[in-house]
Amino acid sequence: MRQLNLKMFTGVAAASILAISACSERSSPTAAAPETGQEQETAPELSASQALLKMADTHAAAVLKTAPEWATSLGVSEDVAGEGYSARLGGYGFEANQQARQLNEGFLQDIRSIDRRDLDPEAAITYDVLRATYETGAQRNQFEFGGATVWGSGSPYIVTQLSGVHLFLPRLLQNQHPMRTKQDARDYLSRLSEFGRVFDELIESIGGDAAVGVVPPYFALEGARRSISSFTSSPPSENPLATTFTTKLEGIEELSNEDRAALAREVETTVETVVYSAYARLGASLENLIPQAGRDAGVWRLGPEGEAFYQHALNGYGAGGMTGDEIHELGLSEVARITAEMDAILVADGVREGSVADRFDAIGQRQDMRYPNTDEGRETLLGDLNIQVDEIMAKASDWFGAIPSQPVEVRRIPIYEQDSAPGGYYNSPSLDGSRPGIYWINLKNTADWPKHTLKTLTYHEAVPGHHFQRSLERAAGLPLIRNMIGYSEFSEGWALYAEQVAAEMGMYDDDPLGNLARLQSELFRAARLVVDSGLHSKRWTREAAIDYMVGVTGDTRASVTREIERYSVWPGQACSYKLGMLKINSLRTKAETELGDKFDIAEFHDEVLLTGVMPLPVLEQKINRWIDAKK
């Protein structure tokens, strides 16, 4: 996935969503009997595993009651997230950050009170996942910038060209807010009316960071300002928040024509008076920060705390204690290996002159590899992606025991986002099954997607990549909180591994140029190890990182520039793809070696996927137990 891991809330968005606006009372991991003056039937004593799961549900509810956006993304009931949550937005200011820290501290105390030795194997995995992610959150909260979090890591910056409230709230309302009833429509308008409060709290947080010298790089500020300008450039009635709303009103049968007209007028007024005003204030605050931003790109620019943040970020994304220098050397080694494999394919095809990157780029420049950069060309491209999904699904049952029941849809990234958006990304289906998985692709310029490169993107973003991993996880009956926690090194490592599995499934048998593109995709992820550590550890400039990646991968300078600017504001995350893939492959090799004829690839894949996302050390322990049991 050459883009942001937007599954829904990660990076800055996760910090924002989890910087929640009210603190919930912690419950004990064991249940206490009610005290009354009358004799009551004694409640059965909970086992240690049952107590852990009850505690996990309490933690999930505490977060969702104060993060209504996340509750909408998951599609949970009001019984879990609180009555009327669809009409509310969470908090984003100083108070919300402080309360997120308090929740993290309380959750960590709770999990440490459990004796892991008393748990059954399935509950023990949940224990390991929760303890690891709460501890990562506590480490993240030691840094007094970038917001606070209940769990996980994230970006050091609250708003960038890549993420922030100004981007994810419109996505939430357009794509995930329910619009089935008149009350849903009223809730939509209620949330729009909160934009002013939300953006003012966001501006407060940005100002607090700036006061201690933490400002995003200049290009991140300029990119965010461009998104704001693009989003508010149309008349309010033509803004996507208004047009999406009025279109969906047509599907609400209980509304009269007069109701629809009145609601349409109200949304237009709210967009103009509340939403556009909030965006204008945010844009002005970002513009005022540009003189402080400087020209450097790496997080080292924040001083010793920036350097410490990068090591924390690397560990949070699967480095296992490897330093920036060690990641850099690993990346260079992988780049050399994959480049040699690509060269062998090109030579066998009779293409010998020039660097591997130049030869790969020349193939992509051929007219037979191009879609017209027109609306018709884009429609053809989207149709081809759907065909690719169908073709690999026809073979999936031979390689996977479990197949997702929820569909995946292919959609174009909205035009107003495409200038700063990644190449493609995936949104998970809702827990209640009402919303499918969505595979998004950036079609600003179809030249970014030569035909032979698209299969690999499909296998990564949709099947058997992110859609398999996230859909099977959500169908596995895991505790709710396990569906709320993400580990990029697991999910992105799986998606990159899925590209390799697609090749093993025969999807490139009659398509050597497609296989060449698959290797180039892996090369791209290996180069990420080099440039991410280059930017944040070796103090490369933005331009030096762009030059290196263009030279190695042959991708367009425009697309690489978006990538480098992404890595600059999200330290460490770009490393998670290759680190995760390497770990999954090493575990598979171990299983194949030790089990011999007892090894079954479909069973191995189910072992990886069906117990949900987890840190790589927890996955390693789980696969080792499976190997021992199979023996």
Image (tube, rainbow, N blue to C red):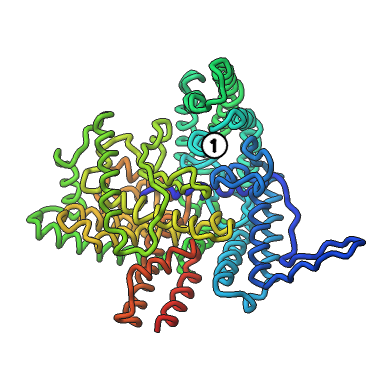
In percent of width and height, residue 256 lies at 56, 19
Badge 1 element: loop
Residue 68, horizontal then vertical, whole percent? 62, 43
265 in relation to 211, above or below: above
- Of all residues shown, which one is farthest toward the bottom? 631
How many marks the image carries: the answer is 1
Q: Along the horizontal axis of the image, is 500 left or right of 155?
A: left
Residue 39, quarter of the rendered image = bottom right
Residue 513, x across and y down, in percent: 17, 53
Find residue 439 and report its image quarter.
top left
- Vertical placement of residue 575 versus 583, above or below: above
Along the horizontal axis of the image, is 66 left or right of 523? right
Say which of 241 and 506 sits in front.
506
Quick check: can you spot residue 169?
yes
Q: Is any atom of residue 569 visible in this view? A: no
- Give the residue at x 58% y 62%: 133
Looking at the image, the residue that sits furthest to the left is: 350
Q: Is residue 556 above or below residue 142?
A: above
Circle 1 residue: 177
Q: Nearer the viewer, residue 123 or 98?
A: 123
Position of residue 413 measured from the top left corner of the image (x, y, whole percent):
39, 37
Q: Amino acid at mark 1?
A: His
Which residue is rendered at x = 35% and y = 82% of the image?
594
Would residue 458 be found to the left or right of residue 257 on screen?
left
Figure quadrant of the C terminus: bottom left
Q: Residues within 10 Å of mark 1 (few under 14, many from 20)?
A: many
Q: Toward the viewer: 325 or 578? A: 578
